[in-house]
Amino acid sequence: MMGRFKHDEYIFYGELSIDGNLVTSLSHDGGTFEMSELALLPPAKPSKIVCIGLNYIDHAVELGMDVPVEPVIFMKPPSSVIGSGDKIVYPAMSQRVDYEAELAVVIGKRCRNIDYEDAGDVIAGYTCFNDVTARDLQQKDGQWTRAKSFDTFAPLGPFIVPEGDFDPSDVSIKCRVNGEVRQDSSTSNLIFDIPHLIEFISDIMTLEVGDVISTGTPPGVGELLRGDVVEVEVEGIGTLANEVI
C-alpha cells in the first residue's frame, strides 16, 4: 500500500511495510520511517473529484428508482479533501448531513478519451471515500454543488492499493457509525464498472494525475450527528475513519 505522509516539514509519498509499521519514501532521496513518527495525509492531491450518483443496483431498488442508462456525474472541489483521522466539520447552514461510503479510483496518468479495455493503464490505485452530503441543502437547491462541496466533505484514504494488487469487481464495502454497521454491500452491485466510468468521464474531460473518481454509494445512506465517528471500510484496502464536529 502507498500513502502520503509528513515528517516534520517533509511531505512525501511512501510505501508501507506488510505489517504497517514502517514507511519507505518513494522520493529520490529515499529514507525509512516508523509509522508512529509520521502524520498521515490524504493519499492523493486531486485537481478534481468526479463522483457518480446512483451506481449500485441495490441502492436503486432501495430508492424505487429506475436504473440509469448512463452514469450521472457531479464534482467536488479539491478543497473538500481530508484524510483519515481528520475532522468532518458540520456546516452551520445545514441541519442534515449524511454519510455515503464509496470505493474511489485514483488516476495515475494524464489522459483523455480512454477506451474501456485500456482503463487499467491510467489507474494508480484504489482507496476509500466518504461522499459527505448536506442532504437538506441538496433537496433545497435542486442541484448538488453546495451540498457536496463544503470543506472537509471529501474524506479520502487511508492508503492507496496499487492497481495491479486489487480486483475491484467484487469486494465488500461497509459504513459504520459509532461502530454500528449502516451500509453493507459489494462492488459486484455496481451498475457501471470502473472501466466504463473512466471511458465515459475521459470522453468529457481530461483526467490529471491524482484525480479521484468515486464510484457511488450502496444502500443505507443516513444521517451524521456532531460527535459521531464514521468509518468507511473497503475489503482489501482498509478503513477510513473521521469524527464529525
Image (cartoon, grey):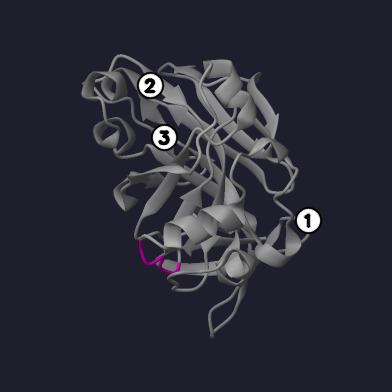
Which residue is found at the position 42% from the left and 71% from the top? 112
20 to the left or right of 57: right
Q: Determine which residue is flagged by label 2.
A: 97
Instruction: Return the x and y of residue 142 as percentages of the image width and height.
Output: 25, 25
Q: Residue furthest right?
A: 18
Q: Residue furthest front?
A: 69
* Magenta residues, start to end: 205-209
Question: Secondary structure of the magenta portion, mostly?
Answer: loop
Question: In terms of image quadrants, where is residue 97?
Answer: top left
Query: Residue 94 or 145: which is nearer the viewer?
Result: 145
Q: Determine which residue is flagged by label 3.
A: 87
Looking at the picture, which amino acid does disc 2 mark?
Answer: Val
Residue 194: in magenta span: no
Q: Gap in Å between the C-alphas at discs 3 and 1?
A: 26 Å
Question: In terms of image quadrants, where is residue 102?
Answer: top right
Instruction: Return the x and y of residue 202 as percentages of the image width and height.
Output: 44, 63
Instruction: Return the x and y of residue 225 as percentages of the image width and height.
Output: 42, 16
Q: Residues within 10 Å of mark 3 (few under 14, many from 20)?
A: some
Q: Gap in Å between the C-alphas at discs 3 and 2?
A: 14 Å
Looking at the picture, which amino acid does disc 3 mark?
Answer: Lys
Tag 3 and tag 2, C-beta contact below 8 Å: no
Mark sitting earlier along the chain (3/2): 3
The secondary element bearing badge 1 is classed as loop
